[in-house]
Amino acid sequence: MISNTRAAPLFFVFAGLFGAAGVALAAVAAHGGGEAALAASASAMCLAHAPALLGLAIGIKAVRTARLAGFLIIVGTLLFAGDLVMLRFAGIGLFPFAAPTGGWAMMLGWLAIAAGGLMRTKP
C-alpha cells in the first residue's frame, strides 16, 4: 500500500493538470452561450479555485510552488471572473483580453501546482 506521503506528489500533478484542463474547457463553454453563460462561467471559476487556494494555504510548506500557484490563481480568477461579471452587468469588460489573460494565469497556477508535486523534497 502506498503511504499518503508518497501519493501526495501524484495527487498534486493530476490536480494541476485537471485544473488547467477545467479552466480551458470552461473558456470554450463560455464562448457558446449568451449572458447567462458569462455569469455561470464566472461562478464556476470562483467556486473551483476557492478550495484550491484553501488547499494551497494548508500545504504551503509542503509544496515549493504553492505561493506562486496561489498568486497566479488569485490574479487569474479576479481577471477572468471580474471581466465576465463586468460584461454581464455593465456591458463592458475590465480591459481588452482581461478574461483570456486571467484564464492563462489560472492555468499557469494549476501547472505550478503540478510542477510543485514533481519538485517536492523528501520530508
Image (cartoon, rainbow, N blue to C red):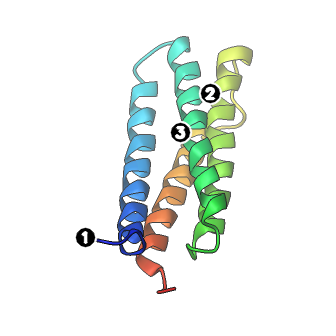
In screen coordinates, is 76 left or right of 10? right
- Who comes first in sequence, dot 2 or dot 3? 3
Mark 1 vs 2: CB contact within 8 A: no
State the separation of the CA atoms marked 1 and 2.
45 Å
Rendered image quadrant of residue 31: top left
Q: Report the Cα–Cα distance between label 3 and label 1.
A: 30 Å
In the depicted structure, whether residue 95 falls above or below residue 41: below
Q: Residue furthest left?
A: 1
The disc at residue 91 is: none
Residue 101 on image: x %, y %: 58, 47
Q: Which residue is mark 2?
A: 84
Tell which tag, 2 or 3, sits nearer the viewer.
Answer: 3
Query: Residue at point 41% right, 55% down?
Result: 15
Mark 2 belongs to which amino acid?
Leu
Which amino acid type is shown beneath numbered disc 3? Ala
Q: Which residue is mark 3?
A: 48
Q: Secondary structure at mark 3?
A: helix
Residue closest to the eye, 81 or 92: 81
